[in-house]
Amino acid sequence: MRAGLVRRHATEQIFRGLGIAAIAVALGFVAILFIDVFRKGIPAFVQSNVHLSVFFDPELIDVDPAPARDQFPSDAEYTAASLKWQRSVALLNWNTIVEASLRKAAPEAGDMTAREILSIPETDARHEIREMFVANPSLLGQTVDVDVLASANAQNWIKGNIDRSLGDKQQQLSAPARALIDTFVENGTISNGFAWSILTNVDSRSAPASAGLLGAFVGTLWMMLIVVVLAVPIGVAAAIYLEEFAPKSRLTDLIEVNINNLAAVPSIVFGLLGAAVFINWFHLPISAPLVGGLVLTLLTLPTIIIATRGALLGVSPALRQAALGMGASKTQMVFHHVLPVTFPSILTATILGVAHALGETAPLLLIGMKAFVASVPATPLDQAAALPVQIYLWQGNENRNFFEPRTAAAIMVLLGVMILLNGAAIYLRSRLEKRA
């Protein structure tokens, strides 16, 4: 007996040790994942800015004075004249203004070509300066300090994302441009700051350094709102009916089997279903958060139904019997006594299901949400991107030196949203358990 007891204790210790080792290994892999993502992503939140003294040279900005409202008898005529003036301003070569400002900051760059010197600031610098002039035409003839983003290639050189020992043919910038960037860094013309643009700008192909996540973030919020509004009430109501009210028959057995099967269906199948039904049949707009939300609703419904039924099954039969014994109807018993007890579990399962849908990419690709969209969706019917799809697009960008850190930064934002959802689930569950 003593020998058997020793063996059982030894087996128990081995089992506990294996369990602790398994948990440690799992946490270790999670830690490695987070460390790798943060190590790559944090540098993306640092951007290089070029500080310029821009002179709005009247010889280069050769346009008529901006129209004034009192010069026209009606608002329509004033608007037409203003638009015509803005078109004439847009036709000017604003790159010459940017080039002159850069040459002023570095007199030693006299032998550099315009293309070489303009490779340092981002391509949208000319648009920023033009918009400043359109908003305030009195700047003509004045000098104004302006901060513009450094180009993606310039930031790669500054941050060391590209090996400086490589030859000129393997570099993204010419040798004079690289030398001028180093000079600008030394004299303070180029400095680093927090990359607000990654959070406040939409995606951009013409100006990669200014590409941001705002459009994808808002599109994701629209989709999650649709999922919560549709999947939660439908899923919970279906689970309550199947568990509490539906008669036991072959039909209900068939429904239960299909729900369990749908929970195991690959997510890409839901994307095919959404493309066939919502786009081809109902003719809803491609790449719209509404379609994405409907597809993710179908994906989330089985999870919510199964979790809600499990929570209802966990309620003690004594509670049901006590409610019925006190004269409550079956509906009153379910909604006044059983359902409040299951609120914490249902809420947790719902938020975790929504968080799972938040990270899905495959079904969104099949409904056209991989399209390049450089705008913030104002309604669920507007074209939009999503955070998982934006990560997918940035990962495949040809300028990997610049977009690999940005991809990791986008993953950090997505993980942050998911952690917030999970934290909300834990907090609300604890509050509801205390009330119960």
Image (cartoon, grey):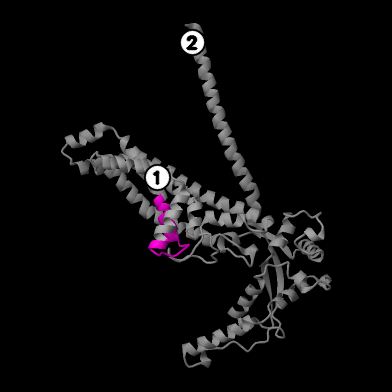
For residue 382: magenta? no
Q: Which residues are magenta?
A: 279-298
Do we see residue 411 in this rendering? yes
Q: Quadrant location of residue 56? A: bottom right
Up-down: is 119 above or below 355?
below
Answer left or right for 391 relative to 49.
Answer: left
Marked residue nearer the N-terminal end (1 or 2): 2
Answer left or right for 349 relative to 338.
Answer: right
The residue under the point 74% across, 66% down is 189
Of residues 420 and 95, the one nearer the viewer is 95
Q: List x then y, in percent, for residue 133.
A: 62, 79
Alpha-carbon span between mark 1 and mark 2: 47 Å
Do we see residue 344 in this rendering? no
* Amino acid residing under circle 1: Leu
**Location of mark 1 (residue):** 262
Up-down: is 248 above or below 19?
below
| Label 1 crowd bin: few (<14), some (14–19), many (20+), radius 10 Å | some
Question: Which element carries disc 1, helix, strand or loop?
Answer: helix
Q: Quadrant location of residue 54? A: bottom right
**Location of mark 2 (residue):** 5
Of residues 126 and 171, the one nearer the viewer is 171
The residue under the point 18% across, 40% down is 328
* Amino acid residing under circle 2: Leu
| Label 2 crowd bin: few (<14), some (14–19), many (20+), radius 10 Å | few
Q: List x then y, in percent, for residue 110.
A: 83, 73
